[in-house]
Amino acid sequence: MNILILLLGLTTMAYAQFNKFTTPPTQYYNPNYYGRPFYAILRQTQDSAPDGSYSYSYDTENGISVAETGQPKNIGPNQIEAVRGQYSYTAPDGTPIVVTYTADENGFLASGAHLPTPPPIPIEIQRALAYNAAHPEEEEPYRRY
């Protein structure tokens, strides 16, 4: 009985081992798992220098285009990366979207025609701000309550 169980176990292991190579590999790996189409990269460049500066860009066949450059910048005792770049694509409604951006000691600043802009400051508030700037309060050495 022990020999029969041993032979059955060895046969099962051998069958499992050889069956792994006879099934199609797409059964184990599905590259289109999320159901999205694949787009080829038409052009790609990348460059980096020993001083820390870099640049890269790429274009895809579905109209996405990206380009960015960066270089280290010393601000006092700190070092930051000053970056400039842009990306563009076509929105689902057919609108072309182009965004240019910079990131440096002033933070991240993006600009594009599709980005919302704040409403203008009302005239009354502009006059009040100008008056406050022209007439600063004098500092009192002691506050009186």
Image (cartoon, rainbow, N blue to C red):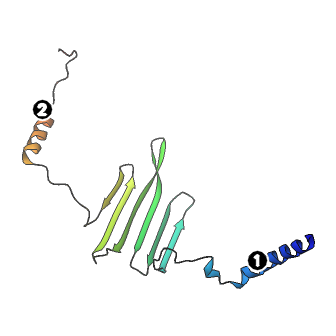
Give whichever of discs 2 and 1 has the lower sequence position.
1
Mark 1 lies on a secondary structure that is helix
Q: Amino acid at mark 1?
A: Ala
Point out residue 83 in the picture as x, y percentages from the top left corner: 42, 58
Q: Position of residue 114 (x, y in %)?
A: 25, 66
Structural crowding at the residue carrying mark 2, measured as other residues with C-alpha within 10 Å and reported as few (<14), some (14–19) or many (≥20): few
Task: Give the SS element for disc 2.
Answer: loop
Which residue does the image show at 37% across and 58% down from the upper left?
102
**In terms of image quadrants, where is residue 27?**
bottom right
Q: Residue at x 92, y 73 (%)?
A: 3
Does 15 appear above or below 98?
A: below
143 vs 132: above or below: above
Foreground mark, 2 or 1, reads 1
Residue at 35%, 49% (x, y): give it. Answer: 106
Residue 11 placed where, x, y %?
Answer: 83, 78
- Quadrant of residue 113 within the rendered picture: bottom left
Q: Is residue 57 above or below residue 131?
A: below
Viewer-nearest residue: 21 or 119: 21
Above-or-below relation of 114 to 135: below
Q: Amino acid at mark 2?
A: His
Q: Which quadrant would residue 97 be assigned to in this image?
A: bottom left
Q: Is residue 101 left or right of residue 142?
A: right
Label 2 close to label 1 by CB (< 8 Å): no
**Count of number-bearing discs:** 2
Closer to us: 64 or 30: 30
Q: Quadrant of the N terminus?
A: bottom right
Label 2 and label 1: CA atoms lie apart by 88 Å
Q: Which mark is residue 135?
A: 2
* In this picture, residue 139 sits left or right of residue 98: left
* Residue matched to label 1: 16
